[in-house]
Amino acid sequence: MITISHLRKTYGRTVAVDEVSLEVAEGEVLGILGPNGAGKTTTVECVAGLRTPDSGTVRVAGLDPRADRAALTRLLGVQLQESRLQPKITVEEALRLWSALYDDPLPWRGLVERLGLEDRVRSKFRDLSGGQQQRLSIALALVGRPRAVILDELSTGLDPRARRDAWQIVRDLSADGVTVLLVTHAMEEAHQLCDRIAIIDAGRVRALDTPDALIAGASAATVTSFAVEDTVDLESLRQLGSVSGVRTDAGRIVVEGSDGAALDVLADLARQRLAPTGLRVVDGTLDTAYLQLTDGIHAHTPEEQPA
Amino acid sequence: MSTATTTPTSRRTNGATAAVVRTEATLFARELGSLFWILLFPTLLLAVIGLVPDFQEANPSLGGQRIIDLYVSVVVVLAMIMAAIVAMPPVIAGYRESGVLRRLRTTPMHPAALLGAQVGLHAVAVLASVVLALATARVLYDVALPGHLGWYAVALVLGTASAFSIGAVITAVSASTRVVQTVGTIVFFPMMFTSGVWMPVQTMEGWLRQTVVSTPLGAASEALNDALQGTAPALVDLAVMGGWTVVLGFVAVRLFRWE
């Protein structure tokens, strides 16, 4: 559905996107994850036809976003980061206007309900909270019954309930066979919604896989923690091939490692004649995979919001 | 967008354009400040100026016209200034700055439709203001209605077009809404002067007059006054307005950025 191949885009001397290639199948939800300035937004803006790539090609359902703009805009819905509307336009007026732009729009009242904006229909855009503006923006991206949707920073500014609603909308889109390109900072969101995740940093794709595979591939695929009465030989644990890190945290010993690490740890404790109490083995998180793939290249602050 | 070819696409485009115009008209109606300065202020100014007794005396050095007669054309140009130079540039710059134009680029509608709607609506407001000013002048101060309606319309269209081309350049050269407002204010006062607000163009003499009539709004003031009296405007006045419009319009189109 969406094909990006060898995409490159520079702003002056800064290389924003460097040789990015991605393939998004019809009905797939592909997450694009990465620190600020990694090139995520530039990539999706090239897909949306808002920017002209320096080199490489982008195709959406076979269409060139720049040359086939008229056809592209009819099948691609776009929710842009930091995009506002006319300050005095009401929610209803905005939705009616957007409905008039498409051949077969969704009934906008249904969208208003799905996004929880029923009691703000007559409110002006500037009087909406950030989260409500965001929800309206999502509604506008969907009103034209798009076959593919770009959602840039979908849940930024949304409270937990609105975030769940937005997630449900993405799941519904996916169930309807709509292709979704989801740009996000939020690991949990990516893990919950995406079929595959591309981790982009410094303009390049660092990893592209399913969320579970990304986690399994990280050095901290599982986290084993326990407490013991006696002193433990931590060095012995560190020597284990499957263990990548050992630390003590609030009286508990925390061991990070690959998939088989938990069994190795238990065997080693048995050799040391120690009985662990309160043993817990949990999956690693996407955070670890993400930090490993994006760390060490630059000092990034992924939580920081764009100014 | 001819109505004869009703392919689904062109019907849709017409419907979409109509929706954009309708929405922008609703939003324009909420801008009470702009509406006051464009629609009412020129006429109020005319009414106040007419209260000066001397201004209602026929003046032989002005070919028998009264000062109040001259001010009718001045306030018409003032309406153009208020709409095209004061009111509209901040709206367009705001749309650009907040990403409205950018957002519209991701829909089947070209953002130029939004700019077109804004120009059209402000032009309609100018026309309404002109009608109000002419009617008020007629009722309060017995100023004759335009003696030659055709020439009056030509002068009006060219004057309005040149005023919008000035506003377009202001919008195009300014990076932000704040800069637009600052540049707009700087341009506002010389434009007011050339329109003749402080001293009608016809009362100016020598090099001052030569300079002022070579500006678009000075020429507009002269051409409107000629057509008001029923004579054809000087060709040079029309050429000055048309020339400025073409040059400024070209500059604005070249420099304008959608984001």
Image (tube, coloured by chain):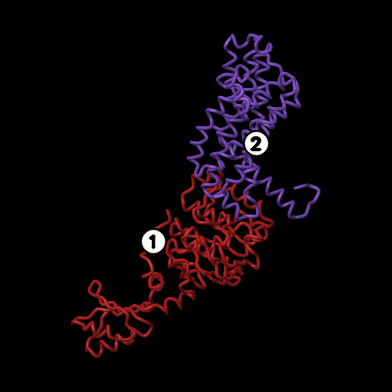
Identify which residue, B69 or A243, lies in the foreground. Answer: B69
Residue where numbered disc 2 is placed: B245
Q: Would residue A145 be seen by someone viewing this image from the given angle?
A: yes
Q: Looking at the image, which residue is at 50% across and 41% down?
A: B177
Q: Position of residue B251 (x, y in %)?
A: 60, 42
Q: Chain of mark 2?
A: B
Q: Residue at x 49, y 47 (%)?
A: A128
Q: Kindly identify the amino acid type of the residue bearing the numbered disc 1.
A: Glu
The image shows residue A206, relative to residue B24, as above or below, that is below
Return the x and y of residue A111 as percentages of the image width and height.
58, 56
Dot 2 amino acid type: Thr
Label 2: few (<14), some or many (≥20) within 10 Å?
many
Residue sitting at the far bottom: A271
Residue that label 1 marks: A303
* Image colour assigned to chain A: red
Hue used for the chain lettered B: purple
Mark 2–mark 1 Cα distance, whole angstroms, equals: 50 Å
